[in-house]
């Protein structure tokens, strides 16, 4: 069946460090790919998205590129801030059938 | 604008009792609807999803069921709750197109005692 795997956390970084959170998905069909973020005490919200191969989604300094050849959608940010501390979820949406699944989440903690 | 309502916010139920959680969406038609469970410190587990009235897909075999009696209403049910059903349940909707995001309800914290 369809599945998504993302890097286990927690990830602890110092402010201004480089961030990568890995995400790979099963390639049944041609999913759209999303990253959601959940800040402490808040609900899930969309961070960025990409809907076809080689597309790059970006928002708030975060980027992720749809890599069809490696079935990956890794999240990156060049310089993290304390305010980026949150849980990040990779989520492929399988167009045929309308299934939206989430990875297990990666908790990021940024220290000043 | 579109809104999603999920209730109740918290619920404490004894083992063996029935469950009914309701989710409604306003301001759109024929949305995709989803039920997830989020365990503490873990990700969102997809339980059920629906692309139309009466169309329910189940992801995880368990003692829960879902129904969509109206276009914008999604109900999560159980005839007899288990202790393991405790958790945080989230309802979500999307337009069902490849490039649209999902929007989440506020969630229901269910504790089975």
Image (spheres, coloured by chain):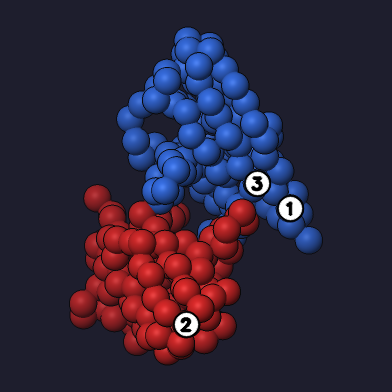
Chain colours: A red, B blue
Query: Which chain does tag 2 point to?
Result: A
Image x and y of residue B22, in percent: 64, 33
Image mark for residue B105: none
**Residue lying at 53% horizontally and 25% vertically, measured from the top left:** B111
Q: Nearer the viewer, residue B73 or B71?
A: B73
Residue B53 seen in the current view: yes
Residue at the top extreme, as displayed: B16
Is B31 on the left-hand or right-hand side of B25?
Answer: left
Which callout, 2 or 3, points to the residue nearer the camera?
2
Query: Which corner quadrant of the image does residue B47 belong to?
Result: top left
Provide residue B70's location: percent of width, then percent of height: 66, 36
Q: Position of residue A40 (x, y in %)?
A: 57, 58
The subunit carrying tag 1 is B
Distance from the alpha carbon under mark 1 to that under mark 3: 11 Å
Using the numbered discs, state the Cα–Cα distance from disc 2 to disc 1 in whole angstroms: 36 Å
Label 2 packing within 10 angstroms: few (<14), some (14-19), many (20+): some
Disc 2 to disc 3, C-alpha distance: 31 Å
Relative to A23, does residue B60 appear above or below in the rendering? above
Relative to B46, is A38 on the left or the right? Answer: right
- Where disc 1 sits, the SS reads strand
Helix, strand or loop at label 3? It is loop
Q: Secondary structure at mark 2?
A: loop
Name the residue beneath numbered marker 2. A15
Which of the numbered marks, if any, corresponds to residue B3?
A: 1
**Relative depth, front residue between A26 and A77:** A77
Relative to A23, say whether B39 is above or below: above
Disc ID at residue B106: 3
Residue at image location 67% in from the left, 40% down from the top:
B6
Taking the spot 61% from the left edge, 54% from the top edge, the residue there is A41
User: Vertically, is B53 above or below B110?
Assistant: below
**Up/down of A77 relative to A100, above or below:** below
């Amino acid at each position: 069946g369809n599945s998504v795997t993302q890097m286990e956390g927690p990830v602890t970084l110092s402010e201004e460090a480089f961030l990568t959170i890995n995400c790979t998905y099963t390639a049944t069909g041609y999913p759209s790919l999303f990253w959601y973020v959940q800040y402490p005490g808040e609900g899930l919200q969309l961070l960025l998205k990409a809907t076809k191969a080689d597309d790059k989604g970006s928002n708030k300094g975060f980027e992720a590129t749809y890599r069809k050849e490696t079935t990956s959608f890794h999240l990156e940010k060049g310089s993290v801030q304390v305010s980026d501390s949150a849980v990040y979820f990779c989520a492929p949406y399988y167009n045929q059938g309308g299934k939206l699944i989430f990875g297990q989440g990666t908790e990021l903690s940024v220290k000043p | 604008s579109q809104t999603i309502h999920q209730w109740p916010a918290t619920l404490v139920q004894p083992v063996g009792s029935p469950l009914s959680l309701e989710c409604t969406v306003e301001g759109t038609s024929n949305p995709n609807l989803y039920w997830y469970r989020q365990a503490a410190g873990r990700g969102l587990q997809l339980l059920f999803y629906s692309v139309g009235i009466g169309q329910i897909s189940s992801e995880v075999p368990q003692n829960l069921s879902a129904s969509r009696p109206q276009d914008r209403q999604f109900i999560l049910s159980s005839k007899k709750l288990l202790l393991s059903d405790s958790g945080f349940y989230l309802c979500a909707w999307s337009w069902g197109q490849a490039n649209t995001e999902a929007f989440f309800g506020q969630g229901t914290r269910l504790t089975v005692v």
